[in-house]
Amino acid sequence: MGRRSFSSTWLVLFVGFLAVSLAPSCAAAEIKTRATEWSFRLLLPSGVTGAESLAFDARGQGPYAGVSDGRVLKWGGSAVGWTTFAHHANYRKLPLCTTPVAPSEETESLCGRPLGLAFHRKSGDLYIADAYKGLMRVGPDGGEAEVLATGVDGVPFNFVNGIDVDQATGDIYFTDSSLTYPRRFNTEIMMNADATGRLLKYDAGTKQVTVLKDGLPYPNGVAVSHDRTYIVVAHTVPCQAHRYYLEGPKAGQYELMADLPGYPDNVRRDGKGGFWVALNQEKARPNATATPMKHLVGVRLDGHGVEVEELTAAKGVTLSEVTQRNGNLWLGSVELRRSGCIVSLHYYYVIISRRIST
């Protein structure tokens, strides 16, 4: 997601236990809300913001998070805290990256701005979608990241954003959100209805990038489906999720999967064949006369694109990622101004009970 989101928050990363379950599939449409206590807190180092995407390695270590000064950080537990795991070559070469003297939005084109993160479990490599530096990779021991690609078919990347890895093939799927506007001007993509984004593939065998689909309106997060037959692509505008088919009779087709109740950012697989979609802000409600009773920050879709769960939070909270791991939800936000935390904060999981075909 870009720097200018619709609202700001002081929270950094959140983790909570999933304390709810889906109601019977035959139930009538109904919304149930349950409070959840957050169990602990993580603090980003002083001077950095914006844990936009989260990743865990094959050993279960992490989370790893890209931050505003161009680094990818690794959480090593409360005794170790955050350490530098990866960075672009410029981070060590340019003093303004390690000792910033200007706002991060003015230096990130030089230092890098890691957005989407995804591990290839077999190799241990971490793939990084850097908004300005392109598609990058770093080995399991971290260090200076290798730039794998900065463009395709003679057209440079302009706003590399979401990413996911096909764990069977090692192929990388990622988005270039706009050929017109870089990350720092992401609001202009929406204001001007820019539709120059692309869905891209990096072939692990040939080391080549190909364009799977172009002319897209603000493509953002991506996720390979559980059965690897399609890719889900979140479009921040017009608040939709699409799927691109990799196999089967629809291979190569791009179709609407779901209309969403807000502006989506990253997409991640859940543990039930569906997907968690983080929402940067709710969609405006036409003719709304009262303040909404809930503030949506994420939705869970089943494999058919049906919304089966909603995640809400206090007003002012905005999310860029919802990642499910070992029965917990890890939440990240790109729009954070200081380290923050989670102790005894109350959020709610809202379950929508509706008829789902089996």
Image (cartoon, grey):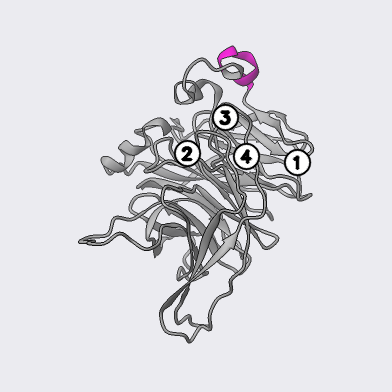
Q: Earlier in the sequence, mark 2 or mark 4?
A: 4
Q: Quadrant of residue 258?
A: bottom left
Whether residue 63 sits left or right of residue 253 in the image: it is right
Residue kind at label 3, given as amino acid type = Val
State if disc 3 and disc 1 touch (CB < 8 Å). no
- Quote the CA–CA distance across marks 2 and 4: 13 Å
In the drawing, what numbered circle is on residue 78? 1
Q: Give the residue pinned by disc 2.
A: 335
Is 120 rendered above or below residue 93? below
Examine the structure image and report whether residue 35 is included in the region drawn in magenta: no
Magenta stretch in the rendered image: 89-96
The percent coordinates of residue 167 (x first, y second) are 68, 54
Q: Is residue 96 above or below residue 71?
A: above
| Comes first in the chain, label 1 or label 4 | 4
- Foreground mark, 3 or 4? 3
Nearer the observer, disc 1 or disc 2? 1
